[in-house]
Amino acid sequence: MNNLQARIEAHIETLSNFTATPGQGTTRLTYSQEDKQAREYIKEKMKEYGLQVHEDGLGNIFGKLEGTLKDAPSVLIGSHFDSVPHGGSYDGPAGVVAGLEVAALFKEKGVKPKYPLEVIALIEEEGARFSGGLMGSRGITGLLSEEEFFKLTDSNGITTVDAMTEIGLNPSLPKKRDPKTIKAFLELHIEQGPILEDKKIPIGVVKTIVGLTQFEITVEGQAGHAGTTPMNRRADALVKAAQIISQLPALAIAEGDGTVVTTGKLNVFPNGSNVIPKKTVFTVDIRSGKEEHIQNVIRKMNNLIESNKEDGIQITITQQLYMEPKVMNPTIVNLLKQTSGNLEIPYCSINSGAGHDAMVLAEVTDVGMLFIPSKNGLSHTPEEWSDSLDITRAVEILFETAKKLTEAEDHD
């Protein structure tokens, strides 16, 4: 194991300790104490690697290596550092660590970029605390306005502003970033699926990222006593929600072509065992590689909900997120492939079935993305694991690619 691989393993292991659920996976929600711990570690490493560090009004972290061109746009490289509840150690942090180590190689090899290199660590990609997901990158690009950001609350009613302030962040700092300050964005991520492992190929060069939309659906009925309210006099919000949810998978199956629908979150109020549910709130996540499929399923879902309305039941639908399918920048894709070939690292083209910050930044800049294999195709679970050797290979590819994108001069 070389020094680079050893450092990568040390980073991953250290970050995995910043969890609210020790021994039960990584739970690192945005603006939590675990976020603060990871944040301090990432900033410390950025400074150690000679980067100028700052945070924006969202809590995204930036570590900048200045270029020789004055006021030139930066090549960004990184990923997110939040997690789902009881998730793994690699989803997000692997990409942040890769960015750190690309910067470390610039320093070690005396590489002087013309265009600045910026390592970024993004917040709330998963949407595990605040609704919608991809919050850090959407805020940077302006897809999430400052007004919308200030209105967001978590399941306990805590606002983004209060949560940020609690860990010493400043929500009044600028959030949206001028696209003219960004030259390109590179992201490494674990595949979260089985393709690379099945093919025994260590690197996937991403061609497209799936489109996705997320809805929050609220069904309101009437609470009542479980023993004294006759069945024909009930307006049960949970029963109605269950009827809708049970029919959603068929919409994706009928659409086909890899279209998927998921209900991942369900809350029942007042949530008493002897009380008829008054209100049920659930989420619907729709994904496809083709926008027409997403639109078709949205239309069918709306028709399904409309047909389930009845006296005593109110149903409201709120769209929390919509991202079109994204094609990665062809020039950067070719550069990643060419670099992989030059380094004699096997690779293949791959499509992403998961959403990533890269798809958001593709709205404003040229983007390239690499995948590395996930053991048994698992992710969002404590068993999530990727080989540090594969991360090391990806870092070598990203380093050479970043050198070209920053038009760096190698003095090694």
Image: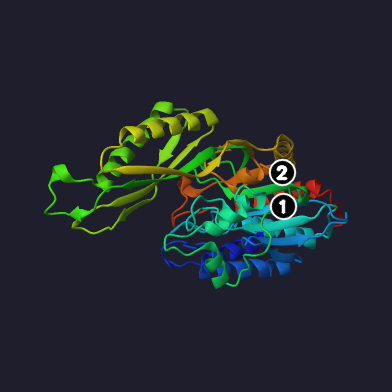
Query: Crowdedness of circle 1 by 10 Å Cα count: few (<14), some, many (20+)?
Result: many
Residue name at image x 54 percent, y 33 percent: 289
State the image coordinates of residue 4 (x, y, percent, origin top left): 68, 60
Report if residue 35 is visible in the image: no
SS for callout 1: strand
Residue at the spot 51% in from the left edge and 48% down from the top edge = 374
* Residue 216 coordinates in the image, percent (x, y): 42, 46
> Height in image: 380 above or below 294?
below
Dot 2 crowding, Cα within 10 Å, few <14, some 14–19, many 20+: some
Q: In the orientation shown, which residue stands out farthest toward the front?
A: 311
Residue 69, located in which quarter of the rendered image? Answer: bottom right
**Which amino acid, by three-letter code, is at mark 1?**
Leu
Q: Position of residue 268 (x, y in %)?
A: 31, 54
Image quarter (top left, top right, bottom left or bottom right) of the N terminus = bottom right
Pointer 1 with pointer 2, Cβ within 8 A:
yes
Q: Is residue 342 above or below residue 222?
A: above
Label 2: state its secondary structure.
loop
- Measured in 3D between alpha carbons, the distance from the residue under mark 1 to the one under mark 2, in whole angstroms, is 10 Å
Q: Is residue 139 left or right of residue 334?
A: left
Report the residue at 44% width, 55% height from top.
383
Q: Quadrant of residue 352?
A: top right
Q: Classify residue 24 as left or right of residue 368.
A: left
Give the amino acid at mark 2.
Answer: Thr
Q: Which residue is mark 2?
A: 365
Q: Which mark is residue 76?
A: 1
Q: Nearer the viewer, residue 142 or 183?
A: 142
Front one among 233 and 42: 233
Q: Nearer the viewer, mark 1 or mark 2?
A: 2
Examine the rendered structure and indicate whether residue 332 appears above or below residue 400: above
